[in-house]
Image (spheres, rainbow, N blue to C red):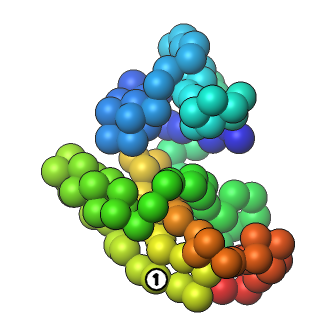
Amino acid sequence: MALTVSDMTTSREFYEGALGLPVLDSSDTYCALSVGGDTVAALILTCHDGGTSEPFSELRPGLDHVSLAVPDPASLDDWQTRLEERGVPADRRRSEWGHHLNFRDPDNIAVELVVLEPDADVREVLGRAGSA
């Protein structure tokens, strides 16, 4: 997944510092961060010349939010503390299919850390996510 960001330094500091994602490769206009542990999965940050400074809104066509899985509900407490220590407000909630920690990145992009319930049917969750 690639996200367009308004300021590479600020966004890299957020995703690397606040979320602890290791940098795989970077330049002034590009940063690849590992999100997959032992798998090959990356979050790419990009800056484009002439990009707008209009804040992100999930109400416009395109991206709704970034969702990253974490191992267990207790880890969400640690993430919430880590984010709030960095001045990032985070909202924790529970749904029928799991535990969620929602917050915004420096460009107002909605980010969710999620722990799915062990018996949650992932196909059902993904199919209903757009209607939640």
Vertical order, 107 against 116 (above or below): above
Q: Quadrant of residue 90?
A: bottom left
Please indicate whether residue 122 sits to the left or right of residue 58 in the image.
right
The residue located at (68%, 77%) in the rendering is 120
The residue located at (75%, 64%) in the rendering is 61
Q: Position of residue 91 (x, y in %)?
A: 35, 72
Vertical order, 45 against 89 (above or below): above
Vertical order, 72 against 14 (above or below): below
Which residue, given by chain and number where applicable, does mark 1 sit on? Answer: 94
The residue located at (38%, 35%) in the rendering is 20
Under mark 1, the amino acid is Arg
The residue located at (56%, 22%) in the rendering is 31
Please give the count of numbered marks on the rendered protein. Answer: 1
Please indicate whether residue 77 sits to the left or right of residue 66 in the image.
left
Please indicate whether residue 68 sits to the left or right of residue 125 in the image.
left
Q: Position of residue 49 (x, y in %)?
A: 62, 25
Q: What element carries label 1?
A: strand
Q: Position of residue 131 (x, y in %)?
A: 73, 86
